[in-house]
């Protein structure tokens, strides 16, 4: 019997077994990664440079883009390097870092989405108290709480998962180090500790989900009371990007967690992992900027400055 610390490395699941397909995988992931870097980087730059965007909503969006950049950078570059150099190996401590960072950023994103739902609730339901309830100090504290929650959750799961004795093998059934895949290698009943932590995480996740639902029930009730049709449309489109991002985040995560074991296969597991780890960080910036005139104006000014710096 071996425990986790006795492994010098883990073996990741490759996307393909021929050099041509590996090169195709590298090219696709490179294009996706560069698109995510560019889109999130432009949003971060626009919000940081344009003083008109120094509001609670854009402050939270800046944090969310940082988390998106961080989460996709945790998994995709290593996968590209593995395909390019035709290797499946990842060092033990590299795997530890992936497990911790991915859990950290994903949990922090979900907590931040909950905070952003509260931001929309205050902006629409109690607009006169918006500056009081979401001042600069309150925004920093709530964002810090989201990041701290992600850190603590990741610390608990990483420490517990990698302390389990592993006796099956060191081959993981995923293209990055994932907690559920490491648990499959365990040969001890101590994995029940991780199940207990997962139950706590599910309860916290359900609490966040319930908060988001209640917030939007109140928002929709307030929107329906707005007398003008133009006002109702403006309020609705103010919430639409956040609703779409929450739906994308939850749908991909729930499918991965609740997928029946009979549906499990290497190809399907790889596909679902791409859906919840690669797709959201790439498309989230497009969703938030699609109907946002203020953000588009800030981006236009940045492009003008790049073209004509003087």
Image: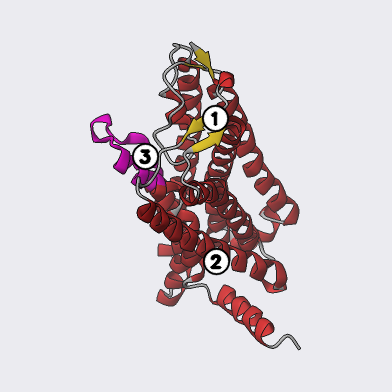
Tag 2 near tag 3, CB within 8 Å:
no
Q: Within 10 angstroms of label 2, few (less than 14), some, or many (20 or more) residues?
A: many
Residue at figure coordinates x 55%, y 41% from the top left? 102
Assign the magenta stretch its main secondary structure: helix
In front of the other: 192 or 227: 192
Above or below, 282 against 83 in this view is: below
In front of the other: 272 or 199: 272
Question: Residue 300 in the image: x percent, y percent?
Answer: 60, 81
Q: How is the image coloured?
A: secondary structure
Secondary structure at numbered mark 1: strand
Precedes in sequence: disc 1 or disc 3: 1
Secondary structure at numbered mark 2: helix
Above or below, 111 against 160 in this view is: below
Question: Residue 210 in the image: x percent, y percent?
Answer: 45, 41
Residue beneath label 2, please? 39
What is the distance, in whole Å, between disc 2 and disc 1 at their CAs?
34 Å
Q: Which residues are magenta?
A: 252-273
Residue beneath label 1, please? 9
Above or below, 88 against 127 in this view is: above
Residue at figure coordinates x 35%, y 45% from the top left? 17
**Apparent side of residue 93 relative to residue 72 in the rendered image (left or right):** right
Precedes in sequence: disc 2 or disc 1: 1
Q: Which mark is residue 267?
A: none
């Amino acid at each position: 019997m071996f425990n986790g610390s006795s492994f010098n490395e883990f073996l990741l699941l490759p996307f393909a077994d021929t050099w041509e397909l590996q090169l195709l995988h590298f090219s696709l992931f490179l294009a996706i990664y560069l698109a995510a870097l560019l889109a999130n980087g432009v949003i971060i730059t626009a919000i940081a440079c344009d003083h008109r965007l120094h509001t609670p909503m854009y402050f939270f969006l800046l944090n969310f883009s940082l988390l998106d950049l961080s989460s996709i950078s945790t998994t995709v570059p290593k996968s590209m390097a593995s395909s390019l150099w035709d290797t499946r190996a990842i060092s033990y401590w590299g795997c530890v870092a992936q497990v911790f960072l991915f859990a950290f950023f994903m949990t922090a994103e979900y907590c931040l989405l909950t905070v952003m739902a509260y931001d929309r609730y205050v902006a629409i339901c109690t607009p006169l108290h918006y500056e009081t309830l979401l001042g600069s100090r309150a925004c920093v504290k709530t964002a810090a709480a989201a990041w701290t929650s992600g850190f603590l959750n990741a610390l608990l799961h990483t420490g517990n998962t990698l302390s389990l004795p592993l006796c099956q093998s060191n081959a993981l059934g995923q293209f990055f180090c994932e907690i559920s895949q490491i648990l499959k290698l365990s040969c001890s009943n101590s994995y029940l500790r991780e199940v207990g932590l997962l139950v706590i995480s599910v309860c916290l996740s359900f609490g966040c989900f319930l908060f988001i639902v209640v917030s939007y029930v109140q928002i929709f009730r307030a929107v329906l009371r707005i007398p003008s049709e133009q006002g109702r449309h403006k309020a609705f489109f103010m919430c639409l990007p956040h609703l779409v991002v929450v739906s994308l985040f939850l749908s991909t995560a729930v499918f991965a967690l609740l997928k029946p074991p009979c549906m499990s296969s290497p190809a399907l597991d790889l596909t679902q992992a791409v859906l919840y780890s690669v797709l959201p960080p790439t498309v989230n910036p497009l969703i938030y900027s699609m109907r946002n005139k203020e953000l588009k104006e800030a981006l236009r000014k940045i492009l003008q400055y790049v073209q004509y710096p003087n």
